[in-house]
Amino acid sequence: MTKLEEILVLVRSINADEFQQQCTNGNSLEDVHKELLSLAEKIESKKKRTDVIIEHISNSYAGDFFNYLPISDAQDELDVFCMGFNTYIDELKAVMVTKKLLETSNNKLVEEKERSEQLAMARDEFLSSMSHEIRTPLNGILGFTDLLLKNRSLDAESKKQLDYIKISGDILLVIINDILDLAKIESGQIALYEKPFDLSNLTKLIYDTFSGKTQAKEIDFKILINKKVPAILNGDSIRVSQILFNLISNSVKFTQKKGKITVKIKLDKEEAGFYHIKITVKDSGIGIPQDKIDTIFDPFIQVSNDTARKYGGTGLGLTIIKKIINIMNGEIHVKSKLGVGTKFTVNLLFAKENAKSVPLKSIINKDKSAVSVNRGGKIKVLLVEDNRINQILAQKVLSKFNFDCVTVDNGSLAVEAVIRENFDIILMDIMMPIMNGYEATAIIRNLEDKTKKSIPIVALTAVVTGSIIEACSSEGIDRYLSKPFESEELYNVIIELVHKEDTI
């Protein structure tokens, strides 16, 4: 190999990629010169392009992300790098756009969250106010009805009429609770109270409630209880009443004149610890279209607007009782045919025995005697209540239990009374003028006298929203009772808290 050939081999080996195809095929000095010039041009071009890339990457590092790198016609390794970098820029742009959209979406979500919280607060305040305004008079109605029912000198007809008031008031109370706190129903957070009740007596009251309407429409209305059904069941009689009331009310509403409504109650089966009771409510009413049956348990839904206008109703009844039945571990089914009628079947579970329950006769005949505490004397109650009717009601109930009662109209007077006198327990209303129940409780809990600051406090309020219950606990209130209250429940709470205080 000559020197010239060796030079050409050496030049062409400097960068094999650059000389995959030789510039010339000759071996002369002119050929060498051409190839050296070509190599120099390519090296210079790469140097300039490398400088551009370095500057561009430096600018990107400084924050200028979105400029593309130039791509030459050489299609070499630098161009491959530039194409990769440009692809990265495209992806980065897409990510940044997505990030911007996400930030915008997040900002909207934050705004919606704040708006929802404001609406929830406004709703809670509205419900609190409505709850207080509706339940306060209802407390008087039901409370005085209870007192009258315990009067042994009542004649049978008067007692029956008071029973009608009581069952109607109880159902009204449940409906009010449901409407005021529909979210609570949707979440299934409904309190059930297990007590022994007479099913025959309950159904008789239900029958009498609807007898006027059924007679006016000449409807053949019957309630049949199978002999195998236990006379006394343990359960929530008000919820059972509500289920029957809603189903029968629908049947009466949608059954034409001279139609037929039959309610059958039977013992479906019996197992260890439980009775399975089946209730069927069958009518010869207008019926439900097949394509509407699946929606009748949805809230605010009625078969048609014409139905709502013609027959009335809120569209909540079936929704509410389905939720109640589910919480009672029961089931409800419906069969219907247009122009023929509708049949609802309800399966409910009742415990055979309830450890917390006492025999029905004991509840009816129970009389409270004077109750003394360890410190001697009767239990002394401070009643803090601004509504005069509810004051009188609570005083009569407490007097029946042989408790001493001092009554004040607001929280400020309650604080003064606690400082001035000794009490075993305080029944505290929440929404009162001058000083509310929270403020009064906070002051009492911060008194220097250890005995006075630890007096048991029971919130006795017509407000039943979840936030109120939480607030009562956080303010140092020992127990919460809603109005209308059950006198037995009030008695048990007072005895429990007073005796608990004496054992500390």
Image (spheres, helix red, strand yellow):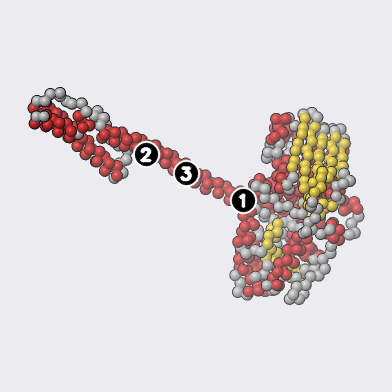
- Name the spot of residue 433 as percent of width and height, x first: 65, 60
Q: Give the residue pinned by disc 1.
A: 124
Mark 1 crowd level (few <14, some 14–19, many ≥20, 10 Å Cα): some
Of label 1 and label 2, which has the lower sequence position?
A: 2
Of label 2 and label 3, which has the lower sequence position?
A: 2
Compared with residue 361, is residue 347 higher up or lower down, i.e. above or below?
above
Badge 1 vs badge 2, beta-carbon distance below 8 Å: no
Badge 1 vs badge 3, beta-carbon distance below 8 Å: no
Q: Give the residue pinned by disc 3.
A: 106
Q: Nearer the viewer, mark 1 or mark 3?
A: 3
- Name the spot of residue 5 as percent of width and height, x first: 11, 29
* Residue at x 11% of width, y 25% of height: 27
Q: How far apart are marks 1 and 2 (CA)?
A: 46 Å
* Residue at x 80% of width, y 29% of height: 340
Of label 1 and label 3, which has the lower sequence position?
A: 3
Mark 3 crowd level (few <14, some 14–19, many ≥20, 10 Å Cα): few
- Name the spot of residue 287 as percent of width and height, x first: 77, 31
User: Depth check: 26 or 205 in front?
Assistant: 26
Where residue 196 sits, quadrant-wise, is: bottom right
- Name the spot of residue 235 as percent of width and height, x first: 78, 52
Residue 92: assigned label: 2
| SS assignment at label 2 | helix
Compared with residue 53, is residue 355 higher up or lower down, i.e. above or below?
below
User: Depth check: 477 or 189 in front?
Assistant: 189
- Of the residues shown, which amino acid type is indicated by label 1? Asp
Q: Which of marks 2 and 3 is in front?
A: 2
Where residue 277 sits, quadrant-wise, is: top right
